[in-house]
Image (cartoon, rainbow, N blue to C red):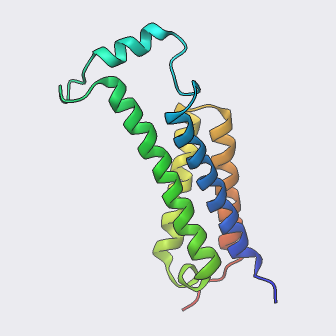
Amino acid sequence: MSAPPGPLLIAAAAGLLALLGALHLVYTYRGPKLLPRDPATQAQMRGDTLRLSRQTTVWNAWIGFNASHGLGLLLFGALYGYFALWHADWLAQSLFLRAAGLVVLACYAVLARLHWFRIPLAGALLALALYAVGLALTPSLP
């Protein structure tokens, strides 16, 4: 017996976000992709602190923000992939879980549009579309 298409689409959305999160973590700690193009900018970031606290540098905050962003994407992907593939009934029964996933994906799409570049925007919009269609094909249970 094959799985219904709704949960599979939700799992695909979750997998896409998990993949983007994993890539973001790798890029945070390996290679030049998340480094400033001008080495002087990185040097300034390493040498200055935030007004919020002198206990960290702008550079350490940058690395921490990028790492926590990647972990958040991985967490979303892991949770919603698990729900969709092993507990689709939880999604079908929980308006909260359904709405939370939709809101988070919509927020990622808005953030990508406002602050990022076209690849994360395309990924966020694709994940949002897969999730929304998956929800539409997963009827709610009483």
Image location of residue 44, percent across then percent down: 35, 12
Residue shown at the point (49%, 72%) measured from the top left: 97
Residue shown at the point (53%, 85%) measured from the top left: 93
Total marks in image: 0
Establish if 26 lies above or below 105: above
In the image shown, does 97 or 74 lie closer to the viewer?
A: 74
Asked if residue 102 shows in the view, the reply is: no
Residue 135: name its quadrant.
bottom right
Asked if residue 94 shows in the view, the reply is: yes
Q: Quadrant of the N terminus?
A: bottom right
Q: In which quarter of the image is the C terminus?
A: bottom right
In the image shown, does 110 or 72 lie closer to the viewer?
A: 72
User: Viewed as shown, does residue 140 lie left or right of 72?
Assistant: right
Image location of residue 71, percent across then percent down: 47, 51
Image location of residue 124, percent across then percent down: 63, 48
Residue shown at the point (66%, 67%) measured from the top left: 11
User: Viewed as shown, does residue 63 lie left or right of 84?
Assistant: left
Establish if 94 lies above or below 134: below
Image location of residue 115, percent across then percent down: 52, 32
Residue 127: name its quadrant.
bottom right
Residue shown at the point (81%, 84%) measured from the top left: 2
